[in-house]
Image (cartoon, helix red, strand yellow):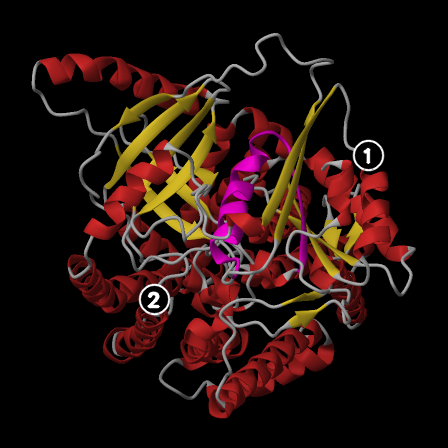
Amino acid sequence: MAEDSVHRPLLHQNGVFETVDVKDTPLFVSSVKWVLKIAMWVLFVAWIAFIFIYPTEFGSQLSQKWNRATSGTVFGITGSMFLVFSGPILVIAFLSIAHLIVSGEDHLERKKKTSKHPRFRLWTFPVLIDGPFGVVSAAEFIGIVVFVVFIIMAVYVYTLRNLNLLAKFQFPTKEQSVWMLELTGLRFGMIGLLCLAFLFIPVARGSVLLRLIDIPFEHATRYHVWLGHLTMLLFTLHGLFYVIVWAIQGHLIHELLEWKNIGIANLPGVISLLAGLMMWVTSLHPVRKQYFELFFYTHQLYIVFVVFLALHVGDFIFSIAAGGIFLFILDRFLRFCQSRRTVDILSTKCFPCGTVELVLSKPTNLRYNALSFIFLQVQGLSWLQWHPFSVSSSPLDGKHHLAVLIKVLGDWTEKLRENILSISEAEPREELSSRPHTKITASVEGPYGHESPYHLMYESLILVAGGIGISPFLAILSDVLHRIREGKPLNIETCIYVTRELEPPLEEGRLDKAVNSTVCPLSIGCGMSVLVGTGNNIWSGLYVISSTVGFIISMALLNIFYVKPFGVSSWWYKGLLFTICMVSSVLIFGGPVIGLWHLWERRTSASDEYEDDKIKVDKAHNNGSIDHKDPNQKNQKSSTTILYGTRPDFKEIFESVSKNWGHVDVGVIVCGPPTLQSSVAKEIRCQSLSRQNHDPVFHFNSHSFDL
C-alpha cells in the first residue's frame, strides 16, 4: 500500500457508499424470512440447550420420559433418539432451504450503508491471534468457550453421578476403582458421541446450513479440525479407560475381540477407534504439511470409522450423531455426481514466476462470487488427487469461463506445468501435420465460497496479499471494476513489497511473455456441473428433502416388514441396517432428483447462445482478466509503488487510514501465510481497542485454504 493510498478509500463518494442492485423487498417476503429465521434460532437454541442438560440427572430423566412417550411408534426407541438429537438439525436444514428459496436473488440485497454508522461485528473482530487456534474472531471465541464449558460441565456432572452410583453399593476398594474407570470410560464415549453430532456439519461443502449463515467452506474446515481433535481425544480416553480395566481384570484380548449381539460390540469399536486414530495422527499439522497425500488417503477411512461405530453402539445410540453424518452423505453424493463430468480447459498459461493459469469452461447458469474455491482433478496427472485453488476471475468477466492461478510448489503442480509446456512445444508440429490440438481435461468440484459478494458491502477495502495470495484479489479487483456505477470514482493504490531483494534487478522493465497453450480456441467446450456450490436452490432443496423423506420411509418399511416380523434384536446388525438405510435413501430417492437436475441443466445450457461470449473468453485471458477499456476508466485513479528490501509497517498504515478515512467501515481481507494474517490481525485488534468515536472500524477477513 503506497503512502498516499490511505488518503482515499477504494469506493467512496461524498462519504456515502451505495451498493449496486439494491431492491426493495416485498413486505410478505420480509415477513416470511423473519419467521423462518426466528423458527431456526428457537429450534437451534432448544437443541443446544437439550444437549447441554443431557449429561445431568434431570436431562437423563427427561430423555427417559421422552423415550417412553414416543417409543411406541413403528420406529421404536431409535426414532425417539433420532427425533430429539438429529431431527432438529435436519429441520433447520429444511427451513434453510425455504429461506434461500424465498430470498432468491434477494440474498445479494444489502441496505445502503453510510459512514455514519460503522459498527463492530463478532465475525470480523479478532480476539485470539497467537494461540493454537490461529486467528480467532469474537464469534469463534464464543463457540470455543461454549464447547469448553460443555465438556468441563459434562465431565464434572458425570463424575458426580458415577460417585453417587458407586456409593449405593458396597464394593471392595479395588473393585470400586475398576468400576469407576469403566464408568468414566463410558461417559467419555457419550460425550464424544455428542461432539460427533457436530463433526461432519462443517465439511459438507455445499451444505445449505453453511450457505444460510454465509460461512465459506475454507473457514468451516477450521471448525472441523477443532472438533476432530476434541472428538478423537474423548474417544481415545473412552477406549483407553476400558483397555486399562480389561488389563486389570486379566482378559484384555478376550474383551477386545468380543462381538456381542445384545449390548455394545467391542471389536467393531476397536476397529472404529483404530481408523479414527490413523486419521487423527496423520491430520496433525507437521504430518499433514510434509505428507499431504498420506493425510488425504488415510482420511478416507472415515467410512470405516462411521460404519464400525454404528456396529459398535447399535442403531439407537448411533442415531444421536446421525443427523450431521446424513447431511454429509447428502453432500458427498452430490459432489460425486458433479465430479463425474469431464470439463474442458479452454486455455493455459505458464508464467516465468512459476505460476500456471487455467481457464475452465462453465455454463452460464453457474453462480459464484469472488473469493471462491474450486477443487480440481486432472486425470492425466492422478485419478485420486483433488487440490483446492482460488478462483482468480470475476463472475462478471464472462459467462462461459472461470480462471484459476496455480503456484508450482509440489509434485502435482510441477507435473501440470510440464504437461502444459510439452503441449505448447508440440502444437507447432501438430499444426504442420494438420492434426487437432492436444486436449487437456479436468474434473471440478465447486465453486464454494460466500453466498453473497461480501467485499462489496464495505465502503473501503484494504487487500493484503502474500505470494500467490494475490490470486483471489484479482477476482475482487475485476469484480469491483465491473460493478462500479457510472460516475462513481474509483481509487486503487497498490504497493508491492519485494522482501527478498534489496534493489531492482537489472532486467526490470523487460516484459517476459507467458508461455501460452490455447487448448480449445474455437469452442466453449464442456462446462462444469452446477450441482454443488451456490447452485439452484429449488433443485438442491428437492434433493435434500426427498432423500430425508426417503430415509424415514426406508426405516419404517424396514421395521414393518423385516425387523419386527423376524425379531431382529442384535444391536450391531440393526446399526448396520441403519447405515444402509441412510446411504440407500440418498441413492434411491435423491438419485432421481439429481438425474432430473442434470437433464434440466443440460436443457438450460443448450438454450444458451455462446456466440456473444466467445470473443470475451479469448480476449479476456489473452490480454488479462480485467478489461482495461472500461467505460468508467475516466473515473478511476490508480498508482503502483514498488519497495525493495522492506516489509509493510501495518501500524503506520492503519494509523494513517484512521486519520484520513474517518468514521467508516473498512474491510481488511488478508490472503497469505499465517504470519502475515497474524500481523494484520494484531494491528486491527490494537486499533479497535484504542479507537475513538470518529475513527473507522476495521473488519478482519482472512482468505486461505489449509486442509
SS label for mark 2 = loop
- Position of the C terminus, as image quadrant, is top right
- Position of the N terminus, as image quadrant, is top right
- Residue 469 on the magenta segment: yes
First in residue order: circle 2 vs circle 1: 2
Q: As drawn, which residue projects farthest toward the top? A: 506
Question: For mark 2, does the 10 Å Cα neighbourhood hold few (<14), some (14 to 19), or many (20 or more) residues?
Answer: some
- Residue 45 on the magenta segment: no
Q: Is residue 483 left or right of residue 467?
A: left
Label 2 vs label 1: CA separation?
Answer: 44 Å
In this rendering, the answer to whether 651 lies above or below 160 is above
Which residue is located at x 66 percent, y 70 percent?
Answer: 113
Residue 429: name its quadrant: top left
Q: Could one spot residue 170 in this view of the protein? A: no
Give the residue pinned by disc 1.
649
Q: Which residues are magenta?
A: 459-485
Q: Position of residue 695 (x, y in %)?
A: 85, 59
Q: Is residue 340 left or right of residue 673?
A: left
Going by the numbered disc 2, the residue's amino acid type is Asn
Q: Is residue 402 left or right of residue 144?
A: left
Give the residue pinned by disc 2.
536
In this rendering, the answer to whether 387 lies above or below 259 is above
